[in-house]
Image: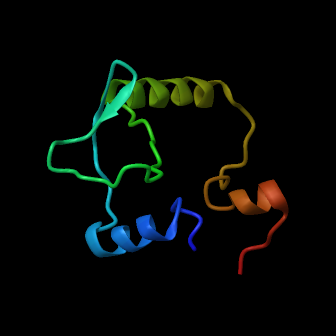
Amino acid sequence: MSLFFENDVARRWALRHIVFMTYIGKVANGTVVLPPEVHLPEGIKVEVTPLVTKQEAEDFTEGILQIAKRVQGLPSDLAERHDFYLHGHFQK
């Protein structure tokens, strides 16, 4: 029995009926609401990953850029050789 399913019946149903793909829903009153055409078996485990909004991504990027502007004294080849500088791994 797979770790992803509560029981063998759920596993067999899923293998016949679910095309394993990602669905996008919205949270309403604390519950994830999927599109009406999505039908999952009762009790199946799901993984929920919140999506980042465009504004959140832009804010994060701006924050990283502000930090990067303050950093001084780094090697000019840091981007190319970051593994060497972090871990001592030589390029092959």
Check the image and name the residue furthest to the right. Answer: 88
Relative placement, left or right, of 16 versus 30 is left
Check the image and name the residue furthest to the top. Answer: 29
Nearest the viewer among 17 and 50 is 17
Please name the residue shown 39% across and 33% down the image: 52
Please name the residue shown 66% across and 56% down the image: 77
- Which of the image's four quarters has the N terminus? bottom right
Check the image and name the residue furthest to the left. Answer: 37
Q: Where is residue 61 in the image (x, y as percent from the top left)?
A: 46, 31
Q: Position of residue 42 (x, y in %)?
A: 37, 50
Check the image and name the residue furthest to the bottom. Answer: 92
Please name the residue shown 80% across and 69% down the image: 89
Classify 92 as above or below 13: below
Nearest the viewer among 86 and 25 is 25
Please name the residue shown 47% across and 48% down the image: 47
Q: Quadrant of residue 13?
A: bottom left
Q: According to the image, what is the colour scheme of the structure?
A: rainbow
- Count of labels in the image: 0
- Which of the image's four quarters has the C terminus? bottom right
Relative placement, left or right, of 49 versus 17 is right
Nearest the viewer among 77 and 20 is 20
Classify 69 as above or below 25: above
Relative placement, left or right, of 82 versus 85 is left
Q: Where is residue 9 in the image (x, y as percent from the top left)?
A: 43, 68
Q: Quadrant of residue 80?
A: bottom right
Q: Position of residue 83 (x, y in %)?
A: 73, 61
Q: Quadrant of residue 58?
A: top left
